[in-house]
Image (cartoon, rainbow, N blue to C red):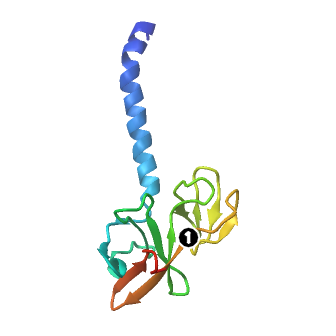
Amino acid sequence: MKRRDFVHRLPVLTAGLAASASTTLLAGCASAPYLVPTVSAGGLGLAVSDLGPAGDAFVQAPDMERPIYVRRLESGALTAVLASCTHRGCQPEPVGDRLACPCHGSEFSFDGEVLAGPAEQPLTKYQVIENAGQIVLRVREGTK
């Protein structure tokens, strides 16, 4: 291939690689569904049936920069933590049996405890109430 042909084809090749990479990245992050909850004075509401196959979901409140990660633990209890790494604020993702921060490698248990640094503080936890197939997350000040 001549240099001129290569230079003319480079934008097409780059676009193809970028599309392929973004598809792979999106597939890797698609393990837990993203849900938009109902908002009330009592907190954020969602249906238990909306949780993904692993019993988890990211819940995006309208006024929060990062979502809340909700997961049913092996014990059967539900836990909810702010998906914002306490090191630099990146969003940890579920990986195996933990939440892993893609930015600097911090790892957290599903209930927010630090398993590996550089983060030193646990994730913010929220009270979870489960009743009759519904979940309420207490996220407002005074409702934690």
Q: Is residue 24 left or right of residue 104?
A: left
Q: Position of residue 117 (x, y in %)?
A: 70, 59
Q: Is residue 140 left or right of residue 79?
A: left
Image vertical order of residue 24 relative to residue 42, above or below:
above
Amino acid type of the residue that numbered disc 1 sits on in the rendered structure: Thr
Mark 1 is surrounded, within 10 Å at the Cα level, by few (under 14), some (14 to 19) or many (20 or more) other residues, namely some
* Residue hosting label 1: 124
Q: Position of residue 95 (x, y in %)?
A: 56, 63
The reply to whether residue 41 is in sight is yes
Dot 1: element: loop
Splitting the image into 4 quarters, where does residue 61 fall? bottom left
Q: Position of residue 84 (x, y in %)?
A: 53, 60
Q: Residue furthest front?
A: 142
Q: Residue at x 42, y 86 (%)?
A: 129
The foreground one among 31 and 80 is 80
Splitting the image into 4 quarters, where does residue 116 fall? bottom right
Q: Residue at x 42, y 78 (%)?
A: 137
The reply to whether residue 2 is in sight is no
The foreground one among 41 and 39 is 41
Q: Residue at x 37, y 62 (%)?
A: 63
Q: Position of residue 134 (x, y in %)?
A: 34, 85
The foreground one among 65 and 59 is 65
Image vertical order of residue 95 relative to residue 136, above or below:
above
Image vertical order of residue 140 relative to residue 77, above or below:
above
Splitting the image into 4 quarters, where does residue 50 fall? bottom left
Q: Residue at x 51, y 71 (%)?
A: 81
